[in-house]
Amino acid sequence: MAGNSIECIREASQSACRVAFFGGSFDPPHLGHLAVARAARTALSLDTVLFAPVGAQPLKLGGASASFEDRAVMTRRAIAGETGFALSYLDMPREAGAPNYTIDTLHSFRAEYPPQSTLFCLMGADSFLALRSWHLADEIPFAASLIVASRPGQSLQDLQAALPAGLIIEPATDQDTTVEGIEVRGFEIVNPAGLRSPFYLLPGLYVEISASEIRQRIETQLQAKAGTEGLLPESVANYIRSRGLYR
């Protein structure tokens, strides 16, 4: 599996490009994940969005419900046929079940691309609002520029409060724009040493789909498709049913 991950990434990294790392449990990957990635791809002119199922999230002690292998297959199915979407094993399980720290994964991410590439880390509002509890959180915005799909009406004060101590958000000059109906608000994250990193907010893109709710619905239904219409790609629902997942 590791060999396949390196081959996939190297194939996409032969020249400078705009790439976003999109990590998460993807347990299971749902239509909300796809909607956020599509919006980011369009709004920020991304060449590639790397969907990277995580091996072991440090803040989720219970772990994922489905195995990493099943989540990788579901993710591959979910993004099949999507221009510029690719499965990445950058965040695959570590040896001896060690936790996957985002800062370490982003350093590996950057090492795979030419220095002139523009790299991003895409996340939803819920992930961003928990950022200050992450390992070496104050380094994350400077490892890859953040793109956050926020809740409608998300206040700048809430976003500032989520940042690790010492980091501040400042408006960026002439960075607010709308691309194909998708609003982008541009800021900069600044650390105490004066280092700056772009920060992009996609307001109004928060999608009310919960992976835990999907799992609960599947657990109580005879068929994986039942109760998940409009929540899961059909190919993912079919895989869940064939494997008997979340029961």
Image (tube, helix red, strand yellow):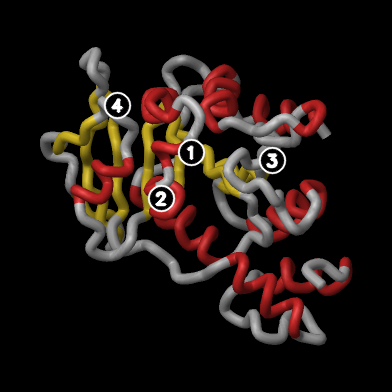
**Circle 3 or circle 4, nearest the eye:** 3
- Few, some or many residues within 10 Å of mark 4 (<14, 14–19, 20+): some
Q: Nearer the viewer, residue 103 or 86?
A: 103
Query: Tag 1: residue type?
Result: Ala
Q: Nearer the viewer, residue 108 or 134?
A: 134
Which residue corresponds to mark 1? 20
Q: Secondary structure at mark 3?
A: loop
**Circle 2 or circle 3, nearest the eye:** 3
Q: Is residue 201 visible?
A: yes
Asked if the residue at tag 4 contacts the one at tag 3, i.e. Cβ–Cβ closer than 8 Å, the answer is no
**Residue 160, image quadrant:** top left
Name the spot of residue 112 as percent of width and height, x first.
59, 21
Label number found at residue 197: 4
Asked if the residue at tag 2 contacts the one at tag 1, i.e. Cβ–Cβ closer than 8 Å, the answer is yes
Query: Tag 3: residue type?
Result: Ala
- Few, some or many residues within 10 Å of mark 3 (<14, 14–19, 20+): many
Q: CA distance from mark 4 to mark 2?
A: 17 Å
- Which one is earlier in the sequence, the residue at label 1 or at label 2? 1
**Circle 1 or circle 4, nearest the eye:** 4
- Which one is earlier in the sequence, the residue at label 4 or at label 2? 2
Which residue corresponds to mark 2? 40
- Which one is earlier in the sequence, the residue at label 2 or at label 3? 2
